[in-house]
Amino acid sequence: MQAGLFDDLPPSPGALPAGLRYEAGWLSAAGKAGLIELVKRLPLKEAKYKSYTARRRVVSFGGQFDYDSNELRPSAPLIAELHPLRERVARWAGIAADALVHVLVAEYTPGTPLGWHRDVPDFEDVFGVSLGHEALLRFRPYPPDSPRREDIVKLNVAPRSLYALQGEARWGWQHSVAPVDALRWSITFRTARR
């Protein structure tokens, strides 16, 4: 077999980190269109990480993490228009809707990446709804003491899909988003740390 020929294929489900669940086509086309229209009206602002201003624009509900002080600070409560989506994500996850205490809406313009990270430790489980263009999520073991390219697991996240990071996938791996080719949004729901 020619080396590199199948490097960009998504992994088989067995190759995904334990605790990473993914469902393509979770949201209807009409549901996606309605959410995109809603997201376009939100007060998105460039994300700030200490002295760095990211290219992605975000808005938080239920808390805003301050990277200068490493503290979760209060922010606006979740808007009513996102309650039905939160309830649907909670049903899929098998938890109560009010357990999803934090929501981050993010916009990625063409060329925007998201570097290697784990979500802030104030939260436990992470559920992401993907809208707009597809994105390539990459996962590698954490901590990355001696990172090796062959340890990276890739997952193409399609528009209208939903993924969950729980347990080992949440705490034993970190993830990143490769620069996107076209406009993409994500709506990420998080539970409080146990």
Image: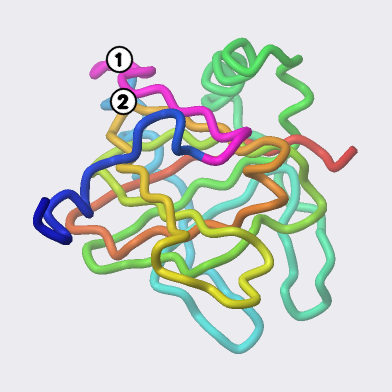
Q: Where on the picture, by quarter, is residue 32?
A: top left
At 18% from the left and 58% from the top, the residue drawn is 181
Determine which of the numbered discs, if any, sits on residue 28 in the image: 1
What mark, if any, has residue 32 been given in the picture?
Answer: 2
Q: Secondary structure at mark 2?
A: helix
Residue 124 is inside the magenta segment? no
> In this picture, is 63 found above or below 152?
above
Q: Amino acid at mark 2?
A: Lys
The structure residue drawn at horizontal position 34% and vertical position 39%, both measured from the top left corner, is: 11
Marks 1 & 2, CB-CB < 8 Å contact: yes
Decide which of 86, 149 is in the foreground and name it.
149
* Residue 21 on the magenta segment: yes
Q: Is residue 193 left or right of residue 132?
A: right
| Three-letter code, disc 1 | Ser
Q: Residue furthest front?
A: 1
List the single residue furthest toward the bottom: 51
Q: Residue drawn 31% across and 34% down?
A: 37
Considering depth in this image, is 157 or 58 the residue closer to the camera?
Answer: 157
Q: Residue at x 73, y 43 (%)?
A: 62
Q: Which mark is residue 90?
A: none
Q: How many marks?
A: 2
Image coords of residue 162 (percent x, y): 45, 28
